[in-house]
Image (cartoon, helix red, strand yellow):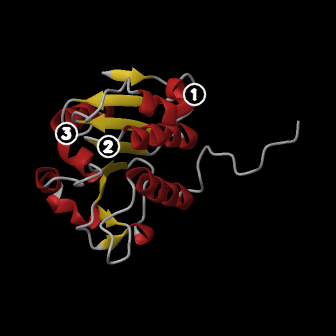
Amino acid sequence: MKAGVAQCNRRFTMEIALFEPEIPPNTGNIIRLSVCTGSTLHIVGKPSFSLEDAMLRRAGLDYWQLSRLTTHNSLEAFLAFLQERDGQTREEVRKRFVLTTRFATNSYAQFEYQSDQILLFGKETSGLPDSVREIFSDHQNQWLRIPVHGDCRSLNLANSVSVILYEALRQQGFPGLNLAPPADT
């Protein structure tokens, strides 16, 4: 089920997946981020809010109409969608996932990103559940963490997506993004 379709013909590279997001303004900010970076956004499972939520739309500003946002009822449905869309086996699809979890030992800054990867982020309050991590347990080399102070569990979800997505895009030379400042008008 598509919530919005981009009106431009750019090639979208990186994909962001939010597993059962809980806070509308975070998701709205990530919608804006996905449009500004040319990334596709997937919401996996049931969010704890309506996609019609005013806070979500306010945070997404006028970028909402430009977003490539797709919703999936479950992780299994998302995996099946990717298999069909990309003509890949389930294992080929699973290999493309990069999980962000505080249980990872790998730093996001030392990981080598590929343009076809899917960055999977968990719920704001509890991260990715054991059942999701188990599906990708044989790819723990693609589980990443953002270093934080010992008194902190995690960063805000929108901040975490920004940090990791921009590192991935930096490694690829910021494909499709304007590196020069805008011309004076």
Q: Mark 3: which secondary structure? A: helix
User: Which amino acid is tagged 1?
Assistant: Asp
User: Which amino acid is tagged 2?
Assistant: Leu
How far, Cα to Cα, is label 1 from label 3?
Answer: 29 Å
Residue 76 point in image, percent of width and height:
16, 37
Name the residue that disc number 3 marks: 75
> Would you say residue 135 is visible in this rendering?
yes
Vertically, is 103 above or below 131?
below
Name the residue that disc number 2 marks: 18
Q: Quadrant of the N terminus?
A: top left
| Residue at 56% from the left image edge and 59% from the top image edge | 170
Q: Mark 2: which secondary structure? A: strand
How far, Cα to Cα, is label 2 from label 1?
Answer: 21 Å
User: Which amino acid is tagged 3?
Assistant: Leu
33 or 54, nearer to the observer: 54
Can you tell which quarter of the image residue 111 is in? bottom left
Question: Could you tell whether 92 is left or right of 5 in the image?
Answer: left
| Residue at 26% from the left image edge and 38% from the top image edge | 88
153 or 40, nearer to the observer: 153
Name the residue that disc number 1 marks: 62
Residue 60 point in image, percent of width and height:
50, 34
Residue 107 point in image, percent of width and height:
37, 71
Vertically, is 170 above or below 37?
below
Question: Could you tell whether 20 is left or right of 162 in the image?
Answer: left
Instruction: Please name which of the two marks, 3 or 2, marks the residue nearer to the observer.
Output: 2
Instruction: Please name which of the two marks, 2 or 1, marks the residue nearer to the observer.
Output: 1
Can you tell which quarter of the image residue 185 is in? top right
Vertically, is 161 above or below 47?
below
Neighbours of disc 3 within 10 Å: few (<14), some (14-19), many (20+): some
